[in-house]
Amino acid sequence: MISYRIEPFDLHAHLFRVVVRIPDPAPEQRVSLPVWIPGSYLVREFARHLQQLTARQGQRELSAEQVDKASWVVRCEGRGALELSYQVYAFDTSVRAAFLDATRGFFNGTGVFLRVEGREQEPQRVEIRALPKGWQVATALGAVQTDARGQGSYEAGDYDELVDHPVELGRFWRGEFRAGGVPHEFVVAGALPNFDGERLLQDTRRICEAQIAFWHGRKKPPYKRYVFLLNAVDDGYGGLEHRASTALICGRRDLPRVGEAGQSDGYVTLLGLISHEYFHTWNVKRLRPAEFARYDYTAENYTQLLWFFEGFTSYYDDLFLVRAGLIDQARYLKLLAKTVSGVLATPGRQVQSVAQASFDAWVKYYRQDENTVNATVSYYTKGSLVALALDLTLRGEGKGNLDEVMRQLWAGSSGGPISEADIAAALKQVGGRSYARELSRWVHGTQDLPLVTLLQAVGVEWKQQPAPWPLRLGVRSADAAGGVSIKAVMRGSAAEQAGLAAGDELLAVNDWRLRKLDDLPLYATESQPAELLVSRDQRLLRLPLQVPAATAVPGPGSLGVAPAAGRETAALREAWLSAR
């Protein structure tokens, strides 16, 4: 059995020490560290944090020759066990890599465990040792022999399973509940003293129960135990799904507080994140792109289906909050309107399809710049609206709904890899007709989705609102000490026509000092051109601006229940939002 031992080596230097024991190694044993972590589609080069790799076979020291950026070869002598020892620098506060200091530790296996090539299918054992006093272990890995703090040995069936279970170390709050007849654990590091853990447990339990029932009815979910690992920080947000756990980050002020009756926007956002990552337990960790049937840890793994696996998950995350009774319909429609407004404010939606955005994730989504808004669309947000459009289309035709499509995909694939053809087939089976035209236009095309019409059919109205000044001018900006800093200029906008560029500092309008973009109408009108004073690369420029009319730019909108909706329309809306 391949075995690993990992321990905090130097807290202040942020170093883990890892020892790998390989019984019966190959004559030229190759090992490598993954270059990416499944669920986060960017080559992250984890090997850059690996240092001081040594190799021994019995009493003999061997040479570990590096053959590429993340791989080493050790030439062994005989069949005696090979032992590799190395250190991993861990100071990444995200959910994707590893972290270690005097307060806590965290790691994903992709960033710390060398892959023994040719032996990935064998069982893999991990020993977690030498923890500082008072520290505990939290992970969904199967325990073999551990003490009260969780120190000891854990085992995985293969390398894929080994690296799909993040580990939290330190002093943290933990609580438990049962959902679907299965134990769930919630671990929170960094919470404030007035954190209401019981409320978080109860709200999370309602999400879990709703999703388990969605997929399985009264049957148990496809795991024996589930663990939420949440790191509460001063300012942060994010999550990464795993087969029986998820790693989360939130702002600690977003956690529920003892004695607090209402729900802050931050807490609702956190609940949506929990819902999103938990839904991934089915949609991407088990149901997954056919291209991900077997991960290649050495390079990009391309697929055009992230619009489905991330987008449809993004559709269901907030929807389950209203279905579980955690938010009301009005709040859900407010969240949905924010998503619709955000997509409509992105010129890149008319340039890139969500299928192409999925494929380009490796080079575009995680490497955003000043032109991102003009050249790309998010497979998360527009993908979620594709799901909404398909769901409302099915419901409007009276042939079923997207819930049934998801369950059909699960049953038809036995919870395994699927292709776009499988998605099309499930839609046809539920809806009774081909949806190839919709998939072609909405997934592979760049047309706007017919959401206003589809929402009207369930008694929900879209009301256009005046565009705020940044959107009206076509910029993304930030107020700075000396003026307004331009972060991005949208394609075809008044700002682009005036010659503004990312990096400019907007100082004045018509010789009036400008400190906030919202003050622009104090100094300029639509009836006559304005003159901007701009600082660019330490030079002052004067640029002519034609102030656009308030109606010239589509603004954000709001969603609300139509007051004149009939009984049948109201029933359709209730069936959609309540899943009855």
Image (cartoon, rainbow, N blue to C red):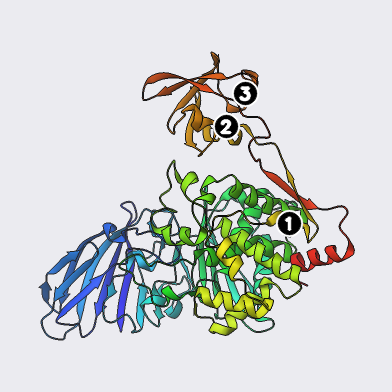
Picture coordinates of residue 199 (x, y %)? 68, 60
Mark 3 residue type: Asp
Question: Of the residues under marks 1 and 3, which one precedes in the sequence?
Answer: 1
Question: Of the residues under marks 3 and 2, which one precedes in the sequence?
Answer: 2
| Mark pair 1, 2: CA separation | 28 Å
Mark 1 residue type: Thr
Mark 2 residue type: Leu
Dots 1 and 3: beta carbons under 8 Å?
Answer: no
Dots 3 and 2: beta carbons under 8 Å?
Answer: no
Q: Residue 131 is drawn in which quadrant?
A: bottom left
Picture coordinates of residue 91 (x, y %)? 36, 53
**Which mark is drawn over residue 453?**
1
Q: Please state if 323 lies on the left or on the right of 274 as rendered.
A: right
**Which mark is drawn over residue 519?**
3
The residue tagged 2 is: 473
**Element type at marker 2?**
helix
Q: Nearer the viewer, mark 3 or mark 2?
A: 2
Which of these two is toward me, 297 or 85? 297
Q: Please state if 55 lies on the left or on the right of 475 as rendered.
A: left
**Element type at marker 1?**
helix
Q: Is residue 373 above or below residue 227?
A: above
Q: Residues within 10 Å of mark 1 (few under 14, many from 20)?
A: some
Picture coordinates of residue 184 (x, y %)? 59, 73
Q: Nearer the viewer, mark 1 or mark 2?
A: 1
Picture coordinates of residue 23 (x, y %)? 23, 84
